[in-house]
Amino acid sequence: MTFASPKANQHALYPGSFDPITVGHVDIVKRGLAVFDRITIAVARNIKKSPIFTFEERVEMIRETFADEPRIEVVPLAEGLLVDFARSIGVRNVLRGLRAMSDFEYEFQMASMNRRLTEDVDFVFLMTSEEHFFVSSSLIRDVAMNGGDVSEFVPKCVQKSLQAKFHSS
Ligand code: ADP
């Protein structure tokens, strides 16, 4: 019996909106780097809900967060099917993070549909640690918008950007 070559595991794609990147995302990337040699973070340009940060700002904050990590690359997520994009850059593994049951249901549907679309690309789920279970970009946005302290939940550069966005005057 033979299976896919070990090389298939070297590279993963981590797609998302990252509006903005949080310690939850960072935790998933850190865990991902223990499994994969390198990770390409793909940032969605168009998001269903209008983002508070522009595409360029979201990319810049991720680049700054991982500035010292050569195994991370940040790229725009191309329009179209995720699995087609993964194949176009030669990636077999899509990395996703899991928080609670709510994530599971959505992720399970998405992974199942994607499996129907192609057998070439697999979804790999990593669970975040307990202290990040409740951290979401949308909650961070709400707390920051209302003047709360989010320093514990986002990288330093994001904290500065949120401060500038909501409380610059
Ligand atoms: P999307 O808009 O695709 O949900 P996000 O930027 O919100 O993109 O998240 C990208 C990925 O990171 C998803 O797999 C999401 O479940 C995961 N993620 C987000 N926040 C956390 C967290 N606190 N812990 C673990 N995974 C997370």
Image (cartoon, helix red, strand yellow):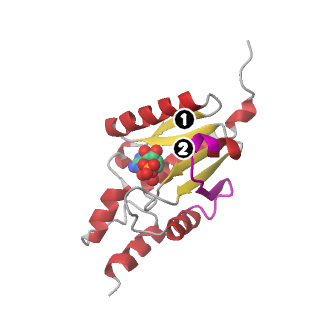
Image quarter hosting the N terminus: top right
Residue at figure coordinates x 32%, y 38% from the top left: 102
Residue ranking furthest to the left: 146
- Where is residue 65, by image quadrant? bottom right
Image quarter hosting the C terminus: bottom left
Q: Amino acid at mark 1?
A: Val
Q: Is mark 1 within 8 Å of ligand 1?
A: no
Residue at figure coordinates x 37%, y 58% from the top left: 49
Q: Secondary structure at mark 1?
A: strand
Asked if 162 appears above or below 141 in the picture, the reply is below
Viewer-closest of 73 and 119? 119
Bounds of the magenta segment: 65-84
Residue 125 location (% of width, % of height): 50, 36
Which numbered dot is residue 31? 2
Residue 149 location (% of width, % of height): 30, 68
Answer with left or right where residue 8 lies relative to residue 48. Answer: right
Residues packed near mark 2 inside 10 Å, few (<14), some (14 to 19) or many (20 plus) = some
Q: Amino acid at mark 2?
A: Arg
Residue at figure coordinates x 75%, y 34% from the top left: 7
| Sequence-earlier tag: 1 or 2 | 2
Let me know if residue 69 is in the magenta part: yes
Answer with left or right where residue 146 lies relative to residue 138. Answer: left
Residue 78 location (% of width, % of height): 60, 54
Residues packed near mark 1 inside 10 Å, few (<14), some (14 to 19) or many (20 plus) = some
Q: On the image, numbered disc 1 is attached to which residue?
A: 124
Which numbered mark, 1 or 2, is in the foreground of this view?
Answer: 1
Which numbered dot is residue 99? none
Q: Secondary structure at mark 2?
A: helix
Viewer-closest of 126 and 15? 15
